[in-house]
Every structure is written in C-alpha cells, then in structure tokens.
Amino acid sequence: AKRKRIGYSRYDSSENIYSKERLTLVGDLIDALENDQFELHYQPQVAAENGRICGAEALLRWQHKEHGYVPPDKIIEMAERLGIIHKLSLYVLRKAIAECRRWHQLGSDVSVSVNLSVRDLANEQLCAKIREYLNEFALDYRYLTVEITESVMMENLALSLGQLKKLNKLGINISIDDFGTGFSSLAYLKRLPVNELKIDKSFIMEIDEDENDQQIVSSTINLGHSLGLKVVAEGVETQQVMDMIKDFGCDQIQGYFISKPLPAKAFRQLLKNASRNVS
Ligand code: C2E
Ligand code: MG
Ligand code: MG
Ligand code: MG
C-alpha cells in the first residue's frame, strides 16, 4: 500500500499518538531543536502605498529525512504536547532577530514578524529573553512584531493581557493574527495593547468574488483604523484582490501574489535587488 504522507495529514484524535511514525517524529523534533535543524522562511510584506517591502513574516520549516515536509502547525502542536514550546519559540525568536539584523546590515530597514503560540505568553522569561536577543544583535525593539492568533488569545485573555502589556511597553509591536476567526469584542480590542490587525486569509483569498467578504474586510479595515491600528491582509494571491484591498485602504499586503515565503538567502537577495531598483 502507498504510504500516507504524514506531512500533509491533519492530526485528529483518532490518530494513534503512539504510532511508530509519530514517535520518530517526536524524537527527531527534539533532536532538530538541539541541533539547529529547523529553517525559517521569510514572506515579504509590502506597503500598500508604494509597494516597497516593509516587513517579513518568519515561518517555521522542517524537512524530515524520512517523512518530508512537516507543516508548522503540526510542529507547534507536537512541541506543545511535549512541553518544549517555550524552547522552540525562543529558538525561532532568536533566529528571526539575528536574520533581521543581517537585513539591516544590507542597508534595509525591514522589520520581522514572529508567530507566538498563546502558551508562550505564560513563559515568564519571554520578555527578558526577547530583550536579551535584541541586545545581542543590536536590533531596535520597533523592528520586531509578534503575531498571536485571535481565537487563542481570546480564550486566554486574562493570561495574555499582562504579558502583552509588558511586551508592548518595551516597544515591540503586537499583531492579532487570523483576525476575524475569533470573537474579539470591540471592548476587548480597545483594552488590548495591540498595534496591528492581520485579517485572516479566508476573507481575502476570494474577496473579488464575494460581496460578504468585501463588506467584512472593508469594515474591519475601518474599525482597525478608527482604533489607530495598522491593518495587514494575508493571502493576497491575485492582482484583482490586491487592487481591491488597496482600494479599501489596507496598509500592508502579504501573499503569494507578492511572493511565497522564501529561504533566508533568497529573501536577502530579494532585498538586495529591491534596493538596487530604487537607487
Ligand atoms: P499564519 O501565521 O497565519 O501564517 C500565514 C500562512 O499562510 C503561512 O502558512 C503562509 O505560508 C500562508 N500563506 C501566505 N500567503 C498565502 C497566500 O497567498 N495563499 C495561501 N493559500 N497561503 C498563504 P504556513 O507557513 O504553513 O504556516 C501555517 C501556520 O503555522 C501559521 O499561520 C502560524 O499560525 C503557524 N506557524 C508558522 N511558523 C510558526 C512559528 O515559528 N511559531 C508558531 N507558534 N507558529 C508558527
Ligand atoms: Mg502569522
Ligand atoms: Mg494568519
Ligand atoms: Mg494561522
């Protein structure tokens, strides 16, 4: 029989968590973390007003020697179960901050966005570690954004709030990821120390063909702006969608239409080419 491609299978409760495949993955995950075998890919974010790259989202990548590509959601879920999520997230933060420093050394002032699991907000060392890495690589706080998914943030609001306030006080930007998939009330949004809303790609991808999506997205952009927040759209795949989102006043665009997430080296090359085109 053909072997199931574990990389693309969704984990569900019927899957045997003690399966042989899963046990190898789990063991290798710990090894990969110890031996720096994860990669980060970087997906550019451009400013709607001039199309210039202003940021990049760091996305975790792991190529397993037998099972091939393991999607990041799956890695995160395993790391949470194993109790090593704090360690993994700090690893990602340090790697992304180090890479952002290299962009700056190339003369660019692009910022980096890192996804955090809501469990990371329970890590009492989080702020201190972020400070340590920013100091180590001499990067200013304003070049770091942390993205936290809306649905999980709302489930853990009490836990999140204190930690988010601490991060925000340092000058780190906070973005609500997958915005529109959770249930933030306006009252919460006002109270949360956030700087950015990132509209979930499910509202963006087919917006040119769906009037409901158009209503949702244009009112979300207005809501964000009226609260003084930057609004980012993810999942922009076509020119039509890009034009429509820009028309609605969205501040930043991210999606395959601009670029897929790129290996670190390719992203640096993109930055070099972009600066050559400007000057
Ligand atoms: P996310 O943070 O919402 O990231 C955006 C996802 O959409 C990425 O998937 C990206 O590759 C994909 N994407 C970007 N543009 C387009 C587009 O135009 N069309 C389509 N169809 N997709 C697009 P990816 O890399 O598979 O990551 C999935 C999720 O895994 C992320 O969703 C994030 O929640 C999580 N994740 C990734 N890296 C990390 C990490 O280092 N730490 C944590 N905690 N979570 C991570
Ligand atoms: Mg994200
Ligand atoms: Mg998202
Ligand atoms: Mg997501």
Image (cartoon, rainbow, N blue to C red):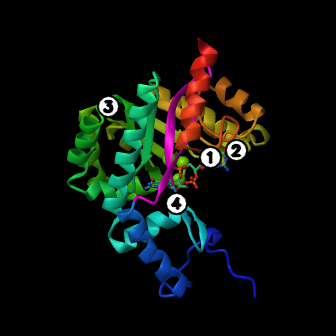
Left or right: 78 in relation to 4:
left
Secondary structure mostly taken by the magenta-highlighted segment of the chain: strand
Q: Residues within 10 Å of mark 4 (few under 14, many from 20)?
A: some
Helix, strand or loop at mark 3: loop
Q: Quadrant of the C terminus?
A: top right
- Marks counted in the figure total 4
* Labels 2 and 3: the sequence-earlier one: 3
Residue 173 makes an appearance in the image: yes
Give the residue type at disc 4: Pro
> Which residue is label 3 attached to?
139
Cβ of mark 1 under 8 A from ligand 1: yes
- Decide: few, some or many residues near mark 2? Use Cα within 10 Å; few <14, some 14-19, many ≥20: many
Q: How far apart are marks 3 and 4 (CA)?
A: 26 Å
Q: Which of marks 4 and 2 is nearer the N terminus?
A: 4
Residue closest to the eye, 223 or 257: 257
Residue 214: within the magenta?
no
State the residue position of label 2.
Answer: 205
Nearest to the observer: residue 106 or residue 174: 106
The amino acid on which the numbered mark 3 sits, given as a three-letter code, is Leu
Query: Residue 224's x, y, as percent?
Result: 48, 32
Depth check, mark 2 against mark 3: the one in front is: 3
Amino acid at circle 2: Met
Q: Earlier in the sequence, mark 3 or mark 1?
A: 3
Which span of residues is magenta-colored? 36-60
**61 lies above or below 226:** below
